[in-house]
Amino acid sequence: MKNPLSSDFVIGFLGAGQLARMSALQAFRFGMQIAVFSDRPEDEPVQFMTPHSYSGSFGDVSLMVEFANKCDVITLENEFIDSEILSKLETVSGTPIYPSPKSFSLIENKLIEKQTFERAGIPVTPYKLIQHDEDLSEFGNMYGWPYLLKSSKGGYDGYGNKTVSSADEALEAFRNLGGKSGHDIIAEAFVDFTHELAVQVARNETGHVVYPCCETVQKNHICVAVKTPAPVSEPVQKRAQELALKATEAIDGKGIFAFEFFLTKEGEVLLNESAPRPHNSGHYSIEGCVTSQFENHVRAVCGLPLGNPSLIQPAAVMINLLGTHNRNAVIEHAEDAAAAGHLHSYGKLQSKTGRKMAHFTLLGEDLENVYSWAMELTKQIEI
Amino acid sequence: MKNPLSSDFVIGFLGAGQLARMSALQAFRFGMQIAVFSDRPEDEPVQFMTPHSYSGSFGDVSLMVEFANKCDVITLENEFIDSEILSKLETVSGTPIYPSPKSFSLIENKLIEKQTFERAGIPVTPYKLIQHDEDLSEFGNMYGWPYLLKSSKGGYDGYGNKTVSSADEALEAFRNLGGKSGHDIIAEAFVDFTHELAVQVARNETGHVVYPCCETVQKNHICVAVKTPAPVSEPVQKRAQELALKATEAIDGKGIFAFEFFLTKEGEVLLNESAPRPHNSGHYSIEGCVTSQFENHVRAVCGLPLGNPSLIQPAAVMINLLGTHNRNAVIEHAEDAAAAGHLHSYGKLQSKTGRKMAHFTLLGEDLENVYSWAMELTKQIEI
């Protein structure tokens, strides 16, 4: 690959949302140019950041080749493009894609993902591929009700998931998720956890760095806040960090990866989800760490040496600012938050209730004090 | 003005170089869109960051109006556009310009600038408007040889300035700088200084913040490194900060401003230069301070509350990386610098010897150790 610190070096993003936007900001810092390919009909955040903007279907390799030919390297902000399509795009255009299509092939399907990580010795939540209707009640009877039904492909932030409390509910949800005719559907036991944890890992041929272990605070399967470091014991933090690194190695990851874990009541750390991209749980790192997840993502995929992921203050809290209205996007009553901390808006033109529109990070000495203050500062905000 | 946290809010930059580029990165963080108007024939750094790109002469209001109509607010990255042109552009387009044309009118001419600051009680370096050839030798005889001849308009990084050691040299330089037929030319005494200092101030209707006092290390009138905090006594640092705030108030500044001072052997702090824009001496603030000069610039001109300018570590050193070759821009042998600290490249396509191409910031506990380390890390770098 060309020296990424050439000013005509172009990094391409498949996907034009906030994760690509925040990565693009780091690419600009290194003097790079950016290009974007979006599959959305409306203007998306990254499209306002470059004259090199393409759009079309993520299934149409011929359309994506023109974009790929513009780029020296390509990366992604989601895991929804089939790895076979990525592989074909890489072959036809000759432009490298990181994380590699091979890495994507190991995690794009939740069933294969779990098998990959199990083989690497990483404890995952109890699960079963649903092949027959009877499997639905058998799983509930073995691991307890309620449990979770998940489509093996395409799930995100609560979509493609369903909590089921009885055999009847399970059968209905199974059919709504596509049943036997759609993607594989797996049953996953509800883990009796005390904390949901997450860890980011950046890795490439120059080495790897592991971010602090954070806690993700969830409401209705959507992350509303992230506390770093997670308020759990040091051995638990270290265990999550070890497993995250092991998982990154298991898929030979090049780029930034995020892993979400359950800490069970028994103190066990179980891998729940993986993301081959910058992740909401790592947004705190923009101001909270010496080198952010976005900067290390750009460094990793471009072959630059990785930067220090250490916290710069003892505590960092990130609050997701979700849409509170359906309207043209505007953030109101954010003056106090903007004055005290670090406000990021993603440049989405339309606000929708519950849509991720912005976030806010606050740093300080004591985690719970910072958390209370951050909650206080943001509760007036309307978007 | 529209709420700047609306995602269709557009901040416009007159000038497309690295100062606008680093400001634009902060505007993106707030979800804004950016537009740019460049007066250069070649592609400039900010033009790679937006689909809203305009170009033409900074003297042609009609060309700039189309750009201005796209913007909700306009700011500048240099002080070379005549304040009368700015005033006309603001009136015709109805788009506010900050810093205001009025502020620019008080500092665009070095003579008026010195008079403005003197009236505000700010000590400036001894100077005299050259009206007759005889003034040249009289000034030298009174304040000592050599002294500096400066064009009252258009000087930058050593251009438009000339050090003169004799009456003959002074006369020649006076004529080369335009003599009586060009802009006013002032003679300025060489100050016997121990340190060159700089301070940034951000100010708007919500208040003001004053950055730490830093030392600029210069070679041939070009800043090669910046040390923060300046290795001078606390009273001297405070004095420079007080004078910087007073100077900002004297021109009713809205935006970010930088002031450069001489610390004389006698311990006096004299104002040397002012810049109504982000300044090279403040680049360290991107990672060195809670809120960078670029972020506070965007906040100030958009009417957002200003952020905390405090240092996040005891010492910050910024090294300017100047072009070492005439070639297509590429940074080589920067791996160690990139791994240890914060490397910024400006995205200029062509490297030229001595051209500001990039910079590098390193933070730490002890200023002189950090400085030595930063120099060590960067000495191999070629651009």
Image (tube, coloured by chain):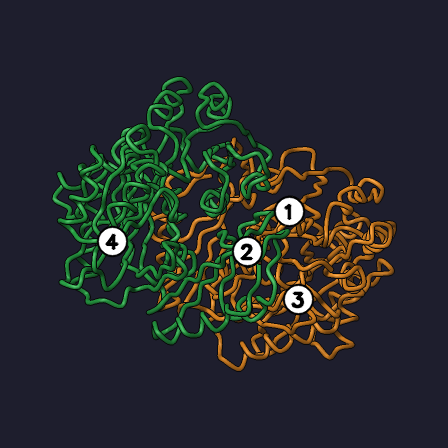
Chain colours: A orange, B green
Q: Three-letter amino acid code at disc 4?
A: Pro
- Both labels 1 and 2 in a single chain: yes
Please, which chain is the residue tagged with disc 2 on? A
- Left or right? Give the position of A148 relative to B363: right
Q: Three-letter amino acid code at disc 3?
A: Asn
Position of the N terminus of chain B, as image quadrant, is top left
| Measured Cα–Cα span from mark 1 to mark 2 | 29 Å
Give the labeled residue for mark 4: B146
**Marks 3 and 1 close (CB-CB < 8 Å):** no
**Marks 1 and 4 close (CB-CB < 8 Å):** no
Position above or below: A4 against B86: below
- Both labels 2 and 4 in a single chain: no
| Measured Cα–Cα span from mark 2 to mark 4 | 66 Å
Decide: few, some or many residues near mark 3? Use Cα within 10 Å; few <14, some 14-19, many ≥20. some
| Measured Cα–Cα span from mark 2 to mark 3 | 14 Å
Please, which chain is the residue tagged with disc 3 on? A
Foreground pick, B87 / B192: B192
Decide: few, some or many residues near mark 2? Use Cα within 10 Å; few <14, some 14-19, many ≥20. some
Position above or below: A193 against A181: below
Give the labeled residue for mark 1: A34
Position above or below: B9 against B126: above
Q: Find residue A223 and name its label.
A: 2
